[in-house]
């Protein structure tokens, strides 16, 4: 089968799609062809990184050892921040249209709801808190976007089987259906998953905690008219002493996770004849007796919360599951991986264009190691709460659940998977500390918050869309200037005298920019300096040209 670009996307079966292996001229080169960046692994992380680099005018070779997209739903919960990244990459709209948007979650103990929560209780955001969408759709839409970009050279059935690092390049040995060839790369991004071949080839490992439990994931096709909410049961009567999670996906497909216990036989448990009674019992318990359903895909898994000690090893940078792994509770795997790619792309572009020193890539490692630790900490706490390993732990958990029916303080202790939010990189060396007093969460290191904002043409729009600089401005920083009048004009003049390339976005006063100003604790003249990945790196009530230059240089690891 040909690539995605040659097909009617609406009629594609993304699960059965196969991509042709094509011989590349590099395979016949007398000496290994050199490319500035080689990305290994065409999953969501590798595809996102390749697209981001290509949009920043960096040519990319993207290698994948397979010729298919993912099998089964796998990662299904894509968070608001990830969708905002996909917006910049040009494909979030399709994902939101196809996926199931949700904000509300419900937690049950036994057969009784103990409480519910809303992940996006306030208006004024373009994207929902989460969408549920099978991973093969996400990969398919990203692959279609990649096919539109001439700077991406995507090679299927190209498996990396060797790597040698030198002072100025890495030399890859690649296995194909027609034999091996060698390829030289200025930098290599290892996005090749939890069983990373590059990690193994370099003799590296990920360390952490393995959880002795088993879980069944099943994709169930059924026409059950249930609200599009996340439902999580502790110790339900239809699956006693275990936990169950229910989500709706696209195409009337429902994702069900059953905790099984460590002693469960994974081969037996994934057989459809053993899954069907479990699903039937769940549906009967929630008043859907007689609903017809089919099992589409199933898997039994165990998991570990672990990471590599360092995400950078010379010219090889690890991202996504190759660098870190978490439990599925909280939807932190794919979301944190895409945020890795978001962090890495602009830094690679800046280094390759000579706009920043090599040390900027060290900041990728330190920032995303910090984020990985945060995700692992939250993931481990969720797993310990969901799967207590002692009677004392179980008694504590059950007491918390019982109290949460009536007491708000107890609800804060319930942990069915604290859902993914972007890490605030407070300790980053790229941040410029505040010299003025601010309140709220938009501290240096935070990802920019969205809000309604009129566009340059005066039409209603969104702040994050206005933050994107013109195409090809690979490492341009953005200055967000609030208000009008003398204070705002003085700030704009200071930015001009700083003599650095900036994309300036004005946030007017009044109803058009009121919510944005509130979220950023801004008054007239306030300026936020944003990195190319839309993280805050500095802010001022009244900037000086010298402060702006110093903050930009610091954010490029020049300071």
Image (cartoon, rainbow, N blue to C red):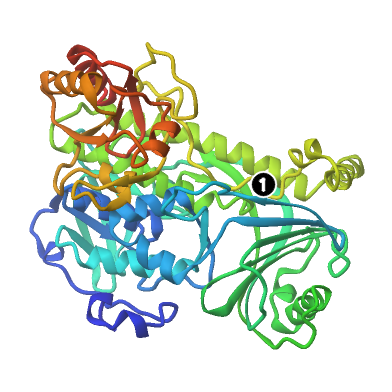
The picture quadrant where one finds residue 412 is: top right
Image spot of residue 188 (x, y percent): 28, 46
- Within the image, what quadrant is residue 156 found in? bottom left
Given the current orientation, which residue lies at the most extreme left position? 30
268 is higher (above) or lower (below) than 397 = below
Quarter the C terminus occupies? top left
Mark 1, residue position:
210
Q: Is residue 269 left or right of residue 179?
A: right
Viewer-side residue, 521 vs 220? 521
Name the residue nearer the viewer: 249 or 17: 249
- Percent coordinates x, y for residue 381 in the rendering: 70, 40
Q: Is residue 533 visible?
A: yes
* Residue 75 appearing in the image: no
Q: Is 255 above or below relative to 527?
A: below
Q: Is residue 363 above or below residue 284?
A: above
**Residue at the spot 29% in from the left edge and 48% down from the top edge:** 465
């Amino acid at each position: 089968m040909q690539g995605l670009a040659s097909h009617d996307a609406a009629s594609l079966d993304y699960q059965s799609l196969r991509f042709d292996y094509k011989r590349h001229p590099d395979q016949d080169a007398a000496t290994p062809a050199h490319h500035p960046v080689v990305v290994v692994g065409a999953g969501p992380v590798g595809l996102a990184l390749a697209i981001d680099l290509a949009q920043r005018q960096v040519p990319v070779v993207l290698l994948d050892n397979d010729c298919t997209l993912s099998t089964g739903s796998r990662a299904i919960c894509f968070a608001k921040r990830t969708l905002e990244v996909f917006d910049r990459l040009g494909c979030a709209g399709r994902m939101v249209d196809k996926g199931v948007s949700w904000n509300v979650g419900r937690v049950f103990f036994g057969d009784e709801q103990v409480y519910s929560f809303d992940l996006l209780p306030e208006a004024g955001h373009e994207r929902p808190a989460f969408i549920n969408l099978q991973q093969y759709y996400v990969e398919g839409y990203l692959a279609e976007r990649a096919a539109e970009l001439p700077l991406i050279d995507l090679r299927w059935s190209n498996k990396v089987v060797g790597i040698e690092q030198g002072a100025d390049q890495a030399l890859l040995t690649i296995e194909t259906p027609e034999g091996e060839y060698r390829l030289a790369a200025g930098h290599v991004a290892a996005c090749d998953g939890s069983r990373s071949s590059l990690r193994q080839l370099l003799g590296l490992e990920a360390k952490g905690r393995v959880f002795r439990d088993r879980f069944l994931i099943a994709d169930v096709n059924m026409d059950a008219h249930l609200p599009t909410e996340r439902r999580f049961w502790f110790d339900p009567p239809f699956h006693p002493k275990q936990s169950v999670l229910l989500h709706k996906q696209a195409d009337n497909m429902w994702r069900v996770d059953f905790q099984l216990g460590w002693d469960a036989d994974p081969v037996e448990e994934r057989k459809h004849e053993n899954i069907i009674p479990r699903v039937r019992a769940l549906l009967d318990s929630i008043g859907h007796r007689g609903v017809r359903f089919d099992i589409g895909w199933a898997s039994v898994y165990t998991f570990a919360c672990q990471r590599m000690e360092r995400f950078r090893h010379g010219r090889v940078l690890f991202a996504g599951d190759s660098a870190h792994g978490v439990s599925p509770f909280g939807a932190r795997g794919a979301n944190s991986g895409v945020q890795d790619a978001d962090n890495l792309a602009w830094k690679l572009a800046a280094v390759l264009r000579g706009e920043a020193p090599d040390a900027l890539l060290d900041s990728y490692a330190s920032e995303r190691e910090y984020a990985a630790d945060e995700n692992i900490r939250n993931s481990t706490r969720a797993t310990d709460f969901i799967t207590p390993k002692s009677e004392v732990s179980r008694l504590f958990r059950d007491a918390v659940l019982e109290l949460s029916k009536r007491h708000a303080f107890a609800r804060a202790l319930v942990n069915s998977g604290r859902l993914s939010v972007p890490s605030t990189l407070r300790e980053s060396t790229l941040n410029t500390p505040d010299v003025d007093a601010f309140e709220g969460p938009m501290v240096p290191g935070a990802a920019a918050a969205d809000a309604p904002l009129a566009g340059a043409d005066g039409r209603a729009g969104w702040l994050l869309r206005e933050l994107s600089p013109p195409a090809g401005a690979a490492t341009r920083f953005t200055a967000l200037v609030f208000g009008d009048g003398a204070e705002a004009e003085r700030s704009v003049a200071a930015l001009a005298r700083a003599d650095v390339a900036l994309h300036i976005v004005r946030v007017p006063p009044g109803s058009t920019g009121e919510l944005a100003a509130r979220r950023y604790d801004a008054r007239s003249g306030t300026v936020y300096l944003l990195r190319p990945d839309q993280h805050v790196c500095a802010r001022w009530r009244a900037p000086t040209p010298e402060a702006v230059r110093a903050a930009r240089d610091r954010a490029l690891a020049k300071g």
